[in-house]
Amino acid sequence: MEKILSYIESNHERYLSELKELLAIPSVSSQTERKPEMRRAAEWLKNHMTNIGLQNMQILETGGHPVVYADWLGAAGKPTILVYGHYDVQPEDPVDLWKTPPFEATIRGENLYGRGASDDKGQIFIHLKAIEAFLKNGGALPMNIKIIFEGEEEIGSENLAKFISEHKELLKADVIVISDSGMFAKGVPSVTYALRGLAYMEVEVTGPNGDLHSGSFGGSVHNPIQALTEMIASLHDKNGRITVKGMYDDVRPLTKAERAAFKELPWSDKKYAKSLGLKQLYGEKGFTTLERLWARPTLECNGIWGGYTGEGAKTVLPAKAFAKISMRLVPDQSSEKIAKLFEKHFKAIAPKTVSVHVRNLHGGEPAITPVDSPGVQAAVVALEKGFGKKPLYQREGGSIPIVVDFKKLLGIDSVLLGFGLPDENAHAPNEFLNLDNFFGGIKTVAHYYKEFPNFWKTGNRKK
């Protein structure tokens, strides 16, 4: 590995120059007028992967933006790693809040600023540079590799599950590595091994058959807004537990080892609350904040509306009120089951003075990879070698639906080996990637490629 690491160390400036080229392409998948830029980004990646020595480069069409594929399969008898990432980015708006142009990557201090720097172009580039280091120094990788970079992650990956289903043989592998996540904090390398799922609902509460004058009818009709807020308020008890019957039936409890691992993380409720402008935190009694963020289901009202909200006064008693409600789910909950339980419960608590309609808008399943699996244990070793510190374990409160799709369609676990930081402004103005994490990430991924075959071969499951 000395030769590999020396090569990485001596090419820092070139790496940054190349990454700036990729970041300069405004590959915003949500904007139709930028469809040519999406194609240009795909072509750029294809050409770059050709130059570093990968094989079988292809731009594969989908119902939307294309998938870029490449592989190197010259390690007979060794495992295959499938690397997933995305080359599309969020819109740069509002542009006036950027200190430097969003598509002119700029180094300020210890960070590289530009749209896509952290999410996800910078992180997929980490893998390409680690691959290059092997192929330019001996012409071979210590394992087989397949790469798919999609162009629709920022718009929901609408066509990716179908693509995977139609290309199962092409994508066959032993583990999936995804670098579209982050470390717990600067200087705190960590392995993310679980994600929450999602059930997203919309509710409609109807009272009278039309809007009414609140002076003429107020006091005789149950205001749908009042009824809705009363119902929403009842969805949690005084201890912060969700009152939907059956909500906790399938929740996988945290192990003692997991709870101990969370306590090792450098966390302060006081600092967290202060950063959010809060005097006090809120949540389910009996669990720490990190446990509530990562390993417990939640129910949140994401939006509520009804009646008159325009300028001035209008004394209306509205006919309808609406709300959007999301529930984050944990292993082993099912989004379909929870959606049905929520609908049944919400209708049951509705007063006779109103009628209720519930719509299931969309859902996604939670995901968890065993921490003693070869993929995760190889990541632990690689992170320690790449950053010089023993990594810690964490979960993630959000959702990455493709992780579940990979497991369901290919039967493969995913390892989230990310190098972003919580404050890197992903999706916001002044997005950046910390340069120490960028270069440390390249070294870490190189070590991962070296280590995984050993864990895979021996089935090493030490904790």
Image (cartoon, rainbow, N blue to C red):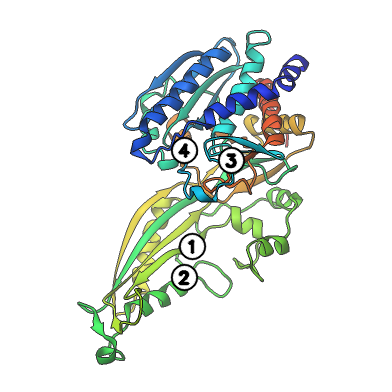
- Please name the residue shown 59% across and 24% down the image: 18
Q: Is residue 172 at all visible to an observer of this figure?
A: no
Callout 2 touching callout 1 (CB < 8 Å): yes
- The image shows residue 420, relative to residue 278, as above or below, that is above
SS assignment at label 3: loop
Q: Position of residue 391 (x, y in %)?
A: 73, 39
What is the crowding at mark 4: few (fewer than 14 residues within 10 Å), some, or many (at least 20)?
many
Residue in the image at 70% along x and 51% along y: 262
Task: Give the structural element (helix, strand or loop) at label 4.
Answer: helix
Residue 181 tag number: 3
Which amino acid type corresponds to the residue marked 3 in the rendered image?
A: Ser
- 10 Å crowding of disc 2: few (<14), some (14-19), many (20+): some
Q: Nearer the viewer, mark 2 or mark 3?
A: 3
Name the one closer to the observer, 38 or 447. 38
Amino acid beneath label 1: Leu
Front residue (pair 418, 433): 433
Q: Which mark is residue 402?
A: 4
Residue depth check, mark 2 versus mark 4: number of the one nearer the observer: 4
Give the labeled residue for mark 2: 235
Which residue is found at the position 35% from the left and 54% from the top?
361
Looking at the rendered structure, the secondary structure element under dot 1 is strand
Image marks 1 and 3: residues in contact by CB distance under 8 Å: no
Inspect the image, locate mark 2, and give the three-letter code of the amino acid beneath it: Leu
Q: Quadrant of the N terminus?
A: top right
Across and down, in percent, residue 173 comes to: 52, 23
> How many residues crowd mark 3 within 10 Å: few (<14), some (14–19), many (20+)?
many
Cα distance in 3D space between marks 1 and 3 = 23 Å
Q: Are marks 2 and 3 in contact (CB under 8 Å)?
A: no
Q: Which residue is mark 1?
A: 299
Residue 167: quadrant of the picture: top left
Q: Earlier in the sequence, mark 1 or mark 4?
A: 1
